């Protein structure tokens, strides 16, 4: 199959999987987009960071899987470990982002200067990190794309397939820039930060369960 | 304009009162009907979905449901296939049936269970299904349970 | 009274106990309404009804569960057969999955059946009617859970904790956003599975493994903390104010309801008695400046009754503030009370029937 055909197939798969990708990424993405209360361009930049991180997660994982010669769909134990670790990463990143927001009372909660400096720097690339962690979460469309990509001729074509698949799913994320309209509501920042902590708790619990299951099953 | 708004507000207030008084007698049924006509159904992961085929046996029948697939990566209930043996009171003490799930004439599952203790097993004949062995409710997607007039058997899809 | 009598006796059940219970309930509701008219106070008398509803609902509900299946836990068989009663709290979580996949992510039934009269269509219809009439007044006249904490909040004469960080009142919105996102992602009612404190006094999934044990622990902790302890300490409806996502959802419908509470600023000399009286932190200096309570106002009438200068009044949207407050109050009360008798009154009567049956 030529490059154009591969691209079309991957893009179509991505577009058809897009709603599932949005539903699974929305709990992580939407509070981050809203919490900063940026205008449309700023929100678009955050979304671009998140998608870039997600792409890095996809491509990085595809690279590792190809090099190891492993098909993740056939290794449920490895998937459980991967799920658990990515959920743990998401939980930590969400909670960290909530603390890093430069508003009271979090400043009071972290009196040390080095913590405040780290927090100030982290909040500017948190979206990228969360996108990366989401990209590792091995949702079924990603696994399906992985299986298909593994059937291509070599690593470069597999990466190309993932890139086109990613572009297809990203089409569905574009409307989330409209959340910038909410920035006029003062309480939105407070609510978004609370959501970050609630979701951090939920993902943390998922991580504990998945890692516990993976550990107990050997 | 002020007067118009005042008239409108007062009218809506009286309409609200009428709505409140009429709801229990007339409107509740109408509202229910409107909601029910929206074409909604209960998620098949709870109820098992729709009956795809019915297989007749001597004295009872087996209702074979459409597979309940995974629709979300975070969905906690594993996808499964549901089969119901009914009427439960007419089942033999020990049930053992080959079930053709997709209607292609080739048996896909061997289902055996005790209709009183609800202990049994599901042995797949191909790779589309997982084996199941136990009694009662193992999980939402793996169970042998008495539900109303039938015995429901669920086994997970691969 | 005739309408109410028709409502209470329109569903005849066999036996003497149901008729006695219906008569007692009717007398109770009529007496409370008469007192509202006589004293020109709303909140005090409404609270008696609401607390009675809150405490009697679990009595009747648990009774029926124990009688039917001997346990409060929901067996999987009941979920499969679609016999789980639909709770209105599921509505916000069910909207996105219903819009996308036309499925209701709840193990109930769409239409009422013999074994499950509380079907999706019935509860949604009731909620819709009540919301169009009352907006967030549902939380003061309809919610059969809110009365529990309102009852506890009324017990102490004075609040032990009076200083509450107002940012916590945004928590219900955060919970609403989180559960809507997660319910859409997981296609399940996340709040019911993880955060509903009222599972403690109604029904809950069987505790079969670590996860369900954790869930049960969360339910009990939230119930004892937010529904019992904090209302006793603060004299506020803390579960409603700091957790309930349905309350946040209902706040949006305050925009379409025609009845509201407004401030006549010419009469107000900020004594903030209204702020102390409000059970849900819906009145404060910002609200007084804007001339109306915050969007979280449940139309309970506590602030109106507490104001010594009649600066806070009932109001019909579109009309002049303070022009005919008593007419606004009466129209609101008649509407709300009609629905309260139908819904809450039925629940009270059903529970009383069971209690009478126990004694007689």
Image (cartoon, coloured by chain):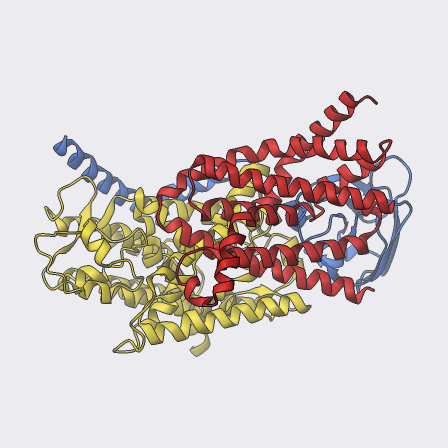
Chain colours: A red, B blue, C yellow
Q: Residue at x 55, y 41 (%)?
A: C98
Q: Is residue B37 visible?
A: no
C233 with respect to B155 (left or right): left
Q: Residue at x 20, y 63 (%)?
A: C274
A122 with respect to C48 (left or right): right
A165 with respect to A176 (left or right): right
Coordinates of residue B149 in the picture (x, y in percent)? 70, 54
Q: Is residue C353 visible?
A: yes
Coordinates of residue C338 in the picture (x, y in percent)? 29, 52
Residue A150: name its quadrant.
top right
Residue B108: name its quadrant.
top right
Q: Nearer the viewer, residue A58 or C339?
A: A58
Against B121, residue C16 (above or below) is: below
A48 with respect to B86 (left or right): left
Coordinates of residue B126 in the picture (x, y in percent)? 90, 45
Q: Nearer the viewer, residue C238 or A50?
A: A50
Coordinates of residue C330 in the picture (x, y in percent)? 18, 52
């Amino acid at each position: 199959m030529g490059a154009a055909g591969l691209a079309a197939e991957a893009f179509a798969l991505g577009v058809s999987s897009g709603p599932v990708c949005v539903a699974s990424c929305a709990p992580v993405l939407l509070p981050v987009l809203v919490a900063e209360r940026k205008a449309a361009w700023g929100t678009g930049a955050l979304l671009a960071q998140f998608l870039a991180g997600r792409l890095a997660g996809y491509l990085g994982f595809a690279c590792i899987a190809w090099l190891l010669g492993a098909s993740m769909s056939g290794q449920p134990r490895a998937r459980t470990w991967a799920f658990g670790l990515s959920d743990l990463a998401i939980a930590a990143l969400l909670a960290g982002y909530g603390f890093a927001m430069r508003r009271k009372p979090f400043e009071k909660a972290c009196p040390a200067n080095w913590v405040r400096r780290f927090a100030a720097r982290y909040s500017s690339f948190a979206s990228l990190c969360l996108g990366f962690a989401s990209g590792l979460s091995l949702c079924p469309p990603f696994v399906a794309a992985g299986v298909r990509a593994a059937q291509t001729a070599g690593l470069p074509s597999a990466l190309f397939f993932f890139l086109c698949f990613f572009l297809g799913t990203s089409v569905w994320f574009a409307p989330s820039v409209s959340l910038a309209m909410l920035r006029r509501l003062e309480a939105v920042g407070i609510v978004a930060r609370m959501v970050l902590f609630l979701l951090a708790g939920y993902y943390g619990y998922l991580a504990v369960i998945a890692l516990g299951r993976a550990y107990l099953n050997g | 304009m002020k007067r118009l708004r005042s008239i409108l507000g007062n009218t809506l207030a009286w309409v609200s009162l009428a709505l409140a008084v009429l709801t229990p007698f007339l409107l509740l049924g109408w509202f229910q009907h409107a909601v029910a006509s929206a074409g909604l159904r209960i998620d098949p992961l709870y109820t098992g979905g729709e009956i795809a085929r019915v297989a007749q046996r001597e004295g009872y029948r087996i209702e074979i449901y459409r597979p309940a697939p995974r629709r979300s990566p975070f969905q906690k209930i594993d996808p499964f296939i549901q089969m119901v043996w009914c009427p439960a009171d007419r089942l033999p003490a020990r049930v053992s049936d080959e079930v053709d799930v997709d209607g292609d004439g080739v048996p896909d599952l061997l289902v055996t269970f005790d209709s009183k203790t609800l202990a049994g097993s599901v042995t797949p004949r191909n790779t589309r299904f997982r084996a199941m062995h136990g009694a009662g409710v193992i999980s939402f997607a793996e169970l042998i349970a008495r539900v109303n007039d039938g015995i429901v058997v669920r086994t997970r899809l691969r | 009274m005739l309408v109410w009598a028709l409502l209470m006796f329109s569903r005849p059940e066999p036996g003497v106990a149901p008729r006695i219970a219906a008569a007692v309930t009717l007398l109770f509701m009529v007496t409370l309404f008469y007192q509202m008219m006589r004293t020109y106070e709303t909140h005090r008398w409404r609270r008696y009804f609401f607390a009675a509803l809150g405490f009697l609902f679990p009595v009747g509900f648990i009774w029926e569960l124990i009688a039917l299946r001997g346990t409060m836990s929901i067996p999987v068989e009941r979920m499969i057969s679609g016999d789980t009663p639909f709770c209105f709290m599921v509505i916000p979580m069910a909207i996105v999955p219903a819009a996308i996949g036309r499925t209701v992510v709840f193990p109930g039934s769409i239409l009422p059946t013999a074994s499950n009269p509380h079907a999706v269509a019935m509860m949604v219809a009731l909620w819709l009617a009540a919301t169009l009439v009352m907006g967030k007044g549902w939380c003061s006249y309809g919610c059969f859970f809110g009365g529990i904490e309102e009852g506890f909040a009324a017990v102490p004469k004075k609040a032990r904790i009076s200083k509450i960080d107002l940012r916590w009142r945004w928590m219900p919105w955060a919970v609403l956003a989180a559960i809507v996102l997660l319910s859409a992602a997981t296609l399940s009612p996340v709040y019911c599975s993880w955060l509903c404190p009222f599972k403690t006094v109604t029904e809950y999934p069987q505790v079969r493994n670590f996860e369900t044990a954790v869930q049960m622990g969360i339910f009990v902790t939230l119930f004892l903390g937010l529904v019992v302890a904090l209302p006793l300490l603060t004299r506020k409806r803390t579960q409603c104010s700091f957790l309930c996502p349905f309350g946040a959802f209902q706040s949006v419908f305050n925009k379409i309801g025609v009845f509201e509470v407004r401030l006549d600023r010419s009469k107000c000399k900020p004594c903030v008695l209204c702020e102390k009286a409000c059970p849900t932190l819906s009145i404060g200096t910002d609200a007084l400046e804007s001339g109306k309570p915050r969007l979280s106002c449940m139309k309970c009438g506590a602030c109106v009754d507490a104001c010594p200068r009649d600066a806070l009044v009932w109001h019909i949207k579109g009309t002049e503030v303070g022009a005919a407050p008593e007419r606004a109050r009466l129209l609101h009360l008649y509407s709300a009370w009609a629905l309260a008798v139908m819904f809450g009154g039925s629940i009270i009567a059903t529970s009383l029937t069971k209690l009478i049956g126990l004694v007689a």
